[in-house]
Image: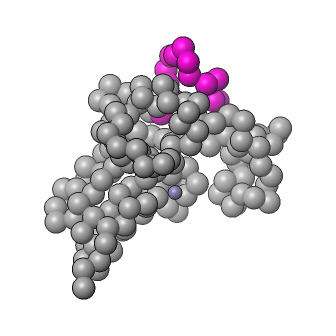
Amino acid sequence: MSLPADSHVHSEWSWDTGGPNSLAAGRMETMCERAAAIGLPAVVFTEHFDFDDAWRTTPEDLMSHQQGMLDPDGYLRPPPLDVAGYRESIDRCRHRFPDLTILAGVEFGQPHLFGRRASMLVDVSLSIGSTVLFTLSRSVTTATSPTPCSGCGPPTT
Ligand SMILES: [Zn+2]
């Protein structure tokens, strides 16, 4: 029996896991190791890629490692995706697991509002709902745009 690809995977590069300096560190490599061990043909990383600055929530809806992302007015302020770190991690895993197909993507929230901002950071090659497969732009190293663009949503900080 052959197994299908896992097409929606989050690693330490998604803000909701805690980030690459949290207990989630190394999750991408561990997932690839497990995928290769059980014979998956491919994994598709779909890290969270959010620009929304109007996302209200309550502490009860957040895990302990996410509590610091809630501002005093109840708005969630997740850190931006570290595009360069994510790309390096993908490259490292592709080198370590050459028989496993590893695709890089993002789970992009509110693309109708933030498409231009996102396109400054990633080159979209395939969109499946909110999941976008892409090649990372070479010139930008963080998901926080250094200069605002016309048509982008309000800045998130
Ligand atoms: Zn997801």
Q: Is residue 100 above or below residue 133?
A: below
Bounds of the magenta span? 143-157
Q: Main secondary structure of the magenta part?
A: loop
Would residue 148 appear left or right of 84 to someone viewing this image?
right
Quarter residue 127 falls in: top left
Residue 47 appearing in the image: yes
Residue found at x 70% / y 60%: 64
Residue found at x 56% / y 43%: 109
Quarter residue 65 falls in: bottom right
Residue found at x 27% / y 57%: 102
Could you say which is closer to the camera, residue 66 or residue 109?
Answer: 109
Residue found at x 22% / y 56%: 94
Residue 79 appearing in the image: no
| Residue found at the far right of this picture | 73
Which part of the image, by quadrant, shows the C terminus? top right
Number of residue marks = 0
Q: Position of residue 39 (x, y in %)?
A: 25, 77
